[in-house]
Image (cartoon, rainbow, N blue to C red):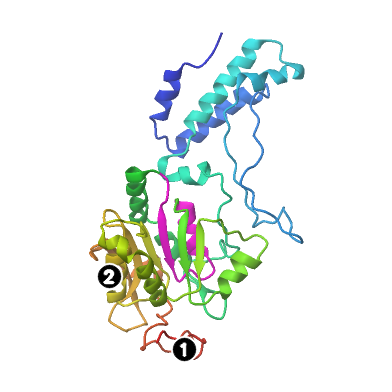
């Protein structure tokens, strides 16, 4: 009887195999397996609900496939398809199980495939372009693609890996400040942060692309707050301040992302008060000079407000964001009174 020994799977699971190596192996194994039909793809899981009037074949409708380990019992059902020996079935089942183990996702990719929850999706995701902003609503833009590439950078992934090592892939928290149409929220969700507070003083873009669009979907772990950052931190303090005084880390975030220009003092405030003290990271476009809204430098801070990385240009894009509407020095079409924003009194 040809059956896999447990030590084989243990050996394979220790190998972090690059895709360029794993794919050729999969092709070879598939050729052996598929000749007998012993390995078939399971039904699609995690498909986003399609509302009335929408098409399930839409190019923006995405599905998530889960690799399922076949069993010998499942494989015996193919005897009637022309396979005349149990040995053939066992061999193909064994090869399929090896393929399953070899291609298991790494830790940093696991969240996308292991969650049974329908993933967050903004219909604006995929519209972003390199070096160009796209108007999402009267109040916000979809940022250049360089922004979302930066959010998915190693610094924020390091925070994710540290959080997983500390407490497992549970309750990883992110704060998305200036979430707009939800593109940055989807990037964070895909990275593995499935508990997200997304805030923006204007709900219009979020409503359009996440709530009203038939392809948009917001799972229970993602909460949107129609608040500017100053009002949000006031509410956060009222809820969690006592926990911080007692040394508990309830309410702290593993990562914080700003999607509009801020002064250095605001970025440091959020980093020191809202970040996880051990491994938290904050990414923000910070004005090169205080209250100068025409040029920013991307910076990554730790929970002490220390700058770990900075860049004035990302690829071909010179870092420049919408100004912080809460500041008195904010001027232009993105600021009050032109956009209807009411500053906190």
Report crowding for label 2: few under 14, some 14 to 19, many 20 or more residues within 10 A (C-alpha): many
Q: How far apart are marks 2 and 1 (CA)?
A: 25 Å
| Residue 198 appears in the rendering | yes
Q: In which quarter of the image is residue 214?
A: bottom right
Q: What residue do we see at 63% from left, 14% from top? A: 88
Q: What residue do we see at 26% from left, 53% from top? A: 278
Tag of residue 268: 2
Confirm or deny contact between disc 2 and disc 1 (CB under 8 A). Answer: no
**How many labels were placed on the picture?**
2
Which is more N-terminal, label 1 or label 2?
Answer: 2
Q: In which quarter of the image is the C terminus?
A: bottom left
Taking 39 as reference, is 214 above or below it?
below
| Residue 319 appears in the rendering | no
Q: In which quarter of the image is the N terminus?
A: top right
Taking 296 as reference, is 281 above or below it?
above
Q: What residue do we see at 77% from left, 61% from top? A: 53
Taking 334 as reference, is 199 above or below it?
above
Q: Position of residue 10 (x, y in %)?
A: 41, 24
Q: Where is residue 41 in the image (x, y as percent from the top left)?
A: 64, 34
Q: Where is residue 30 in the image (x, y as percent from the top left)?
A: 59, 28
SS category of the residue bearing label 1: loop
Taking 211 as reference, is 322 above or below it?
below
Give the magenta part as a residue range.
169-191
Residue where numbered disc 1 is placed? 336
SS category of the residue bearing label 2: helix
Q: Does the magenta stretch include residue 96?
A: no
Q: Position of residue 292 (x, y in %)?
A: 32, 84
Q: In which quarter of the image is residue 254?
A: bottom left
- Farthest residue, direction top: 1
Residue in front for this viewpoint, 255 or 130: 255
């Amino acid at each position: 009887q040809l059956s896999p020994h447990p030590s084989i799977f243990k050996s394979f699971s220790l190998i972090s195999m690059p895709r360029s190596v794993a794919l050729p192996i999969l092709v070879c194994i598939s050729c052996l397996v598929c000749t007998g039909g012993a390995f078939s793809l399971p039904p699609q899981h995690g498909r986003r609900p399609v509302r009335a009037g929408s098409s399930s074949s839409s190019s923006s409708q995405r599905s998530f496939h889960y690799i399922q380990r076949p069993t010998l019992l499942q494989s015996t059902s193919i005897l009637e398809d022309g396979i005349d020996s149990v040995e053939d079935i066992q061999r193909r089942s064994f090869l399929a199980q090896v393929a399953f183990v070899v291609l298991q996702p790494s830790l940093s990719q696991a969240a996308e495939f292991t969650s049974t929850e329908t993933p967050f999706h903004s219909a604006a995701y995929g519209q972003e372009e390199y070096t160009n902003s796209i108007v999402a609503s009267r109040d916000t833009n979809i940022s250049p693609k360089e922004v979302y590439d930066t959010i998915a950078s190693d610094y924020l992934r390091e925070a994710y890996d540290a959080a997983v090592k500390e407490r497992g892939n549970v309750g990883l928290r992110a704060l998305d400040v200036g979430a707009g149409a939800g593109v940055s929220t989807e990037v964070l969700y895909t990275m593995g942060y499935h508990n997200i507070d997304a805030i923006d003083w204007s709900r219009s873009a979020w409503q359009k692309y996440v709530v009203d669009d038939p392809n948009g979907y917001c799972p229970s772990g993602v909460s949107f707050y129609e608040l500017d950052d100053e009002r949000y931190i006031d509410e956060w303090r009222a809820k969690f301040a006592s926990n911080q005084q007692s040394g508990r880390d309830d309410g702290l975030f593993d990562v914080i992302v700003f999607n509009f220009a801020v002064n250095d003092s605001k970025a440091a405030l959020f980093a020191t008060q809202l970040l996880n003290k051990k491994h938290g990271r904050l990414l923000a476009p910070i004005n090169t000079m205080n209250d100068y809204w025409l040029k920013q430098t991307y910076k990554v801070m730790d929970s002490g407000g220390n700058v770990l990385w900075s860049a004035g240009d990302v690829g071909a894009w010179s870092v420049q964001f919408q100004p912080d509407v809460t500041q008195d020095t904010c001027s232009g079409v993105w600021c009050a009174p032109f956009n209807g924003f009411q500053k906190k009194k």
